[in-house]
Image (cartoon, helix red, strand yellow):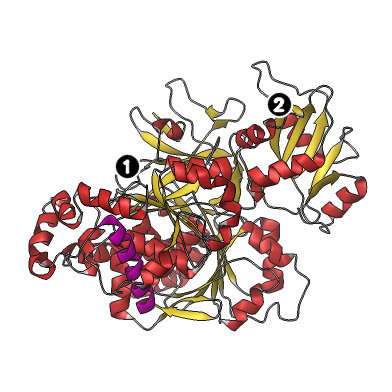
């Protein structure tokens, strides 16, 4: 009888499940569960690797930092597997290990370090000291006396000696040499600082000072443009290297030649093993919300977490990943390269993005996964149609910043393939994944996801530039459909390490007393919206910073550069929306000094010399005066809303013609061509 009663219930169960799945949030429950399981597996795998590294012989390569021991593991497991493909050359994991070991020895030679002749016999004792917390004792055995460091400095010229933890800045394009130098620095117990390749003059010098760099490695092709900066670089007492053969300016030596003279055998792990996973591993520069670039501290923990990125994206060791992003970006280096190391896959590295060559490269190298930023996909969609648009083996595109309209057009033209949109910040402690592939979303507001990456959206007063607080002084969560400031709790498992330099640089990045007295949250500076189905959508950035060409642009810094020109009396910089383009383009409203005329040629020459390409204003607006608020702040919102339409903005307007290398009058014909997508800015 019981069986007869239960049978109808069992038959109704599938209908009940289907009914539940129709509910807006429950319908995605299975996908949420599947991603949670994948995340837990990834976490366990990383924990197992950490445990193996902690138990490893500190005298061996697998006892070092996360980069060192992961490379060593891959060499042990799959030495002949292709790690990197660049310009037709293939590099195995064994070759990557060999090349980076040679570079590490070149750096160690400058440090004055010499291999301990009793290393093999004393490794167990050193390991015991390190495991017991005496990391400083172990490091001191590998470091030279200060007198030896000074002798090395005198031999190489006048520069500050390199010591354990010293910072070496890399000004390099995306090439294999970038990777060998980065890995080699890590193995030598030094910290890399990834300098954006477009920076010169003041911004470059600021970056070098802010991270405390003691050495700089420059690509040979950048040396000519660095000529005006050489006196200042020498004044900083930097050890100067070129990553390749000469001719070199005075004071530079060929680092790759020095590395080629070194052996490529394993290095002892204790040289690079951190005392804590929260120790700084490297610096990546972020423009932040105001002012010059800031050197974000990247911890060993973050590098370790990034090893799990592609695993979370369901990428496998037999996948081939196409990477055409700059390596000085977190997306290129930590997510692209370190993520590839995490699963032991193959990466095709493209030094410079080419929309016309993109799919041909994918076909040639049998690419299955590529990493993007929003602009990259727009460039691909804007290419002329081709019969080979769907003739590729790409199954997955991973990245951030893809607009919903481009998302749909991309899939219609180049599908079938899956898009996995993500969200995160270089210095942040939270990340989201749109693992379902819902167009336009950057992630999910799932209680399951928040178990291992918690975050909240709080009400934000855009005019006041701060979160809204209730009568108790606590922040207010936003309801579904309302834009809110994304914040994430700061704790031991999700820390915020800040920036190199003054603690003032991190002002505003930490919010206190958010939901209860005494708590601390990281302020992402981004407004997001959660829709009725539990999907997160990016809304906008707070403050005056806007995003263009995948970069954050600080209006105050651009205005400061323009203000140097004696022809200008007042400058107001802001971002304007350009139809068909991701982010906002820079626009400058300027007031001329009395009895001065606008010299467009001089204006362009100044902008092109000082500002990186993404920060150069695309539009100029000539005003009689600039309006201010009651508190004497410049009016940006109204100007941004008015835009750059010459039919409605009745003041002189100019646009940056990149092909001509000049600012030209923005005519109605120019405006129409820009909106039609016939002109690229």
Q: Which mark is residue 523?
A: none
Q: Is residue 74 above or below residue 623?
A: below
Horizontal and vertical percent position of residue 472: 42, 21
Q: Residue at x 69, y 19 (%)?
A: 629
Horizontal and vertical percent position of residue 554: 60, 38
Q: Which residues are magenta?
A: 94-112
Q: Is residue 152 above or below residue 564?
A: below
Residue beneath disc 2 = 635
Q: Nearer the viewer, residue 506 or 648?
A: 506
Q: Residue at x 52, y 40 (%)?
A: 288
**In the picture, residue 47 is in which quadrant?**
bottom left
Q: Is residue 444 above or below residue 349?
A: above
Q: Nearer the viewer, residue 261 or 467?
A: 261
**354 with respect to 189 (left or right):** right
Quadrant placement of the N terminus: bottom left
* Residue 126 seen: yes
Residue beneath disc 1 = 491
- Which element is circle 2 on? loop
Neighbour tally class for label 2: few under 14, some 14-19, many 20 plus, Cα within 10 Å: some
Q: Residue at x 55, y 78 (%)?
A: 367
Q: Earlier in the sequence, mark 1 or mark 2?
A: 1
Horizontal and vertical percent position of residue 268: 21, 66
**140 with respect to 331 (left or right):** left
User: What is the distance, in whole Å, between disc 1 and disc 2 at their CAs?
Assistant: 38 Å
- Which element is circle 1 on? loop
Mark 1 vs mark 2: give the one in front.
2
Q: Nearer the viewer, residue 587 or 304?
A: 587
Q: Would residue 95 be counted in the magenta stretch?
A: yes
Q: Would residue 372 be counted in the magenta stretch?
A: no
């Amino acid at each position: 009888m019981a069986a007869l009663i239960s049978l109808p219930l069992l038959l109704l169960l599938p209908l009940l499940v289907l009914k539940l799945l129709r509910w807006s949030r429950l319908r995605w429950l299975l996908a949420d569960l599947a991603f949670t399981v994948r995340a837990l597996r990834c976490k366990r795998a990383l924990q197992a690797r950490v445990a193996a590294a902690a138990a490893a012989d500190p005298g061996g390569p697998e006892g070092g930092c996360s980069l060192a021991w992961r490379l060593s593991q891959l060499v042990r497991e799959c030495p002949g597997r292709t790690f990197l493909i660049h310009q037709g050359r293939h590099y195995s994991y064994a070759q990557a290990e060999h090349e980076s070991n040679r570079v590490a020895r070149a750096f160690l030679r400058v440090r004055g370090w010499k291999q301990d002749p009793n290393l093999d016999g004393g490794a167990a004792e050193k390991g015991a000291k390190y495991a017991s917390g005496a990391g400083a004792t172990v490091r001191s055995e590998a470091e030279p006396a200060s007198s030896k460091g000074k002798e090395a400095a005198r031999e190489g010229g006048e520069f500050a000696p390199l010591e354990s933890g010293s910072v070496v800045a890399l000004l390099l394009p995306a090439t294999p040499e970038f990777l060998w130098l980065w890995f080699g620095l890590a193995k030598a117990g030094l910290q890399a600082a990834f300098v954006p390749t477009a920076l010169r003059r003041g911004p470059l010098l600021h970056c070098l000072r802010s991270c405390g760099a003691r050495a700089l490695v420059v690509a040979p092709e950048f040396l000519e443009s660095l000529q005006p900066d050489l006196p200042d670089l020498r004044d900083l007492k930097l050890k100067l290297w070129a990553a390749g053969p000469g001719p070199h300016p005075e004071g530079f030596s060929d680092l790759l030649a020095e590395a080629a003279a070194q052996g490529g055998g394993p290095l002892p792990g204790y040289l690079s093993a951190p005392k804590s996973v929260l120790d700084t591993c490297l610096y990546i520069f972020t423009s932040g919300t105001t002012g010059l670039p800031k050197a974000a501290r990247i911890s060993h923990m973050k590098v370790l977490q990034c090893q799990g990125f592609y695993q979370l994206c369901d990428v496998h060791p037999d996948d081939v990943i196409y990477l055409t992003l700059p390596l000085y970006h977190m997306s290129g280096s930590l997510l692209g390269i370190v993520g590839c190391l995490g699963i032991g896959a193959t990466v095709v590295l493209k030094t410079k993005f080419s929309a016309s060559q993109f799919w041909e490269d994918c076909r040639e190298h049998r690419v299955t996964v590529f990493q993007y930023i929003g602009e990259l996909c727009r460039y691909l969609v804007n290419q002329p149609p081709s019969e080979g648009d769907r003739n590729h083996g790409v199954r997955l595109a991973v990245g951030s910043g893809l607009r919903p309209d481009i998302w749909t057009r991309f899939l219609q033209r180049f599908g079938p393939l899956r898009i996995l949109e993500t969200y995160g910040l270089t210095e942040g402690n939270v990340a989201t994944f749109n693992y379902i592939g819902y167009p336009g979303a950057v992630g999910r507001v799932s209680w399951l996801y928040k178990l291992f990456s918690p975050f909240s959206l709080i009400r934000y007063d855009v005019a006041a530039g701060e979160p809204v607080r209730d009568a108790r002084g606590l922040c207010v969560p936003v309801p579904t459909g309302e834009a809110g400031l994304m914040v994430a709790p700061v704790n031991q498992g999700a820390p915020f390490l800040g920036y190199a330099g003054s603690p003032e640089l991190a002002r505003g990045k930490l919010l206190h007393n958010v939901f209860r007295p005494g708590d601390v949250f990281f302020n992402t500076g981004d407004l997001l919206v959660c829709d009725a189905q539990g999907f997160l959508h990016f809304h906008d950035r707070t403050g005056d910073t806007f995003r263009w060409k995948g970069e954050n642009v600080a209006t105050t810094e651009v205005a400061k550069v323009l203000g140097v020109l004696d022809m200008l009396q007042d400058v107001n910089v802001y971002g304007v929306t350009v139809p068909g383009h991701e982010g906002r383009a820079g626009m400058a409203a300027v007031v001329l000094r009395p009895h001065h005329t606008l010299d467009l040629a001089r204006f362009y020459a100044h902008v092109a010399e000082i500002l990186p390409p993404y920060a150069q204003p695309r539009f100029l607006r000539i005003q009689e005066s600039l309006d201010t608020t009651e508190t004497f702040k410049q009016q940006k919102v109204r100007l941004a809303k008015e835009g750059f339409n010459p039919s409605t903005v009745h003041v002189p307007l100019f646009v940056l013609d990149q092909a001509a290398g000049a600012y030209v009058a923005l005519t109605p014909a120019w405006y129409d061509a820009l909106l039609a997508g016939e002109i690229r800015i």
